[in-house]
Amino acid sequence: MSSHSRKRALRRLLAVSLLTAMAILLNAFDMALTLPIPSVRVGFSHILTISALYILGRKEALLVVLFKVFLSALIFGKLASPAFFIALAGNSAALLFLTAGFRRFSLIPLSIGGAFCNNLGQILVVYFFFIPKSELLWYFFLMLLGGTVSGLLIGLLSGLIIKRVRYAALDL
């Protein structure tokens, strides 16, 4: 491996580490932010997932999401709790959609679709493993409304970050 290749790999690793750290901080902010609807969150950390996807690529976005979910659960004492598995399912479903669609959709529909998949992944885990009640369907519709609004916001904010980073002189 040449010196330039090693430097580039190190820069990419550093970028993943920084994006992960920022995602954990935004996740903590999201948990502290109280909204009028129980367990509905904006999902600010997804800004960094989408940014990692567009700036670094699929593999790095996967690393940011996995590290964020595991380290957040470890830091906040939720590892192996229902909240951890619900978050893992939601983030995984969102990431699958994002990585499959990021060359096919523009940023806003992609972000809204990611929010939908996140909500779907969460509600499926809750239904099949914790609360198998059909009443969850009504809550899912409420989650979809919040997810659409937050997906729009996340898409707009991600677009600003991606635009700024693309014009920076980075060799990632």
Image (spheres, rainbow, N blue to C red):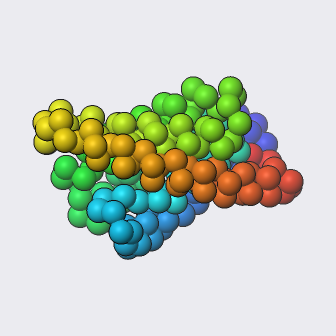
Q: Is residue 69 left or right of residue 45?
A: left
The x, y position of residue 133, in whole percent, is 14, 38
Residue beneath the point at 18% across and 52% down: 81
- Regarding residue 126, the answer to whether it shows in the image is no
- Regarding residue 46, the answer to whether it shows in the image is yes
Residue beneath the point at 49% across and 65% down: 26
Residue beneath the point at 27% across and 35% down: 124
Residue beneath the point at 36% across and 69% down: 36
Q: Quadrant of the N terminus?
A: top right
- How many numbered marks are there? 0
Q: Is residue 131 left or right of residue 70?
A: left
The x, y position of residue 4, in whole percent, is 79, 43
Is 170 in front, or is 9?
170
Q: Is residue 161 above or below residue 33?
A: above
Q: Is residue 170 left or right of residue 1?
A: right
Quarter location, residue 5 = top right
Quarter location, residue 77 = bottom left
Is 124 in front, or is 167?
124
The x, y position of residue 79, in whole percent, is 23, 54
The x, y position of residue 99, in whole percent, is 57, 31
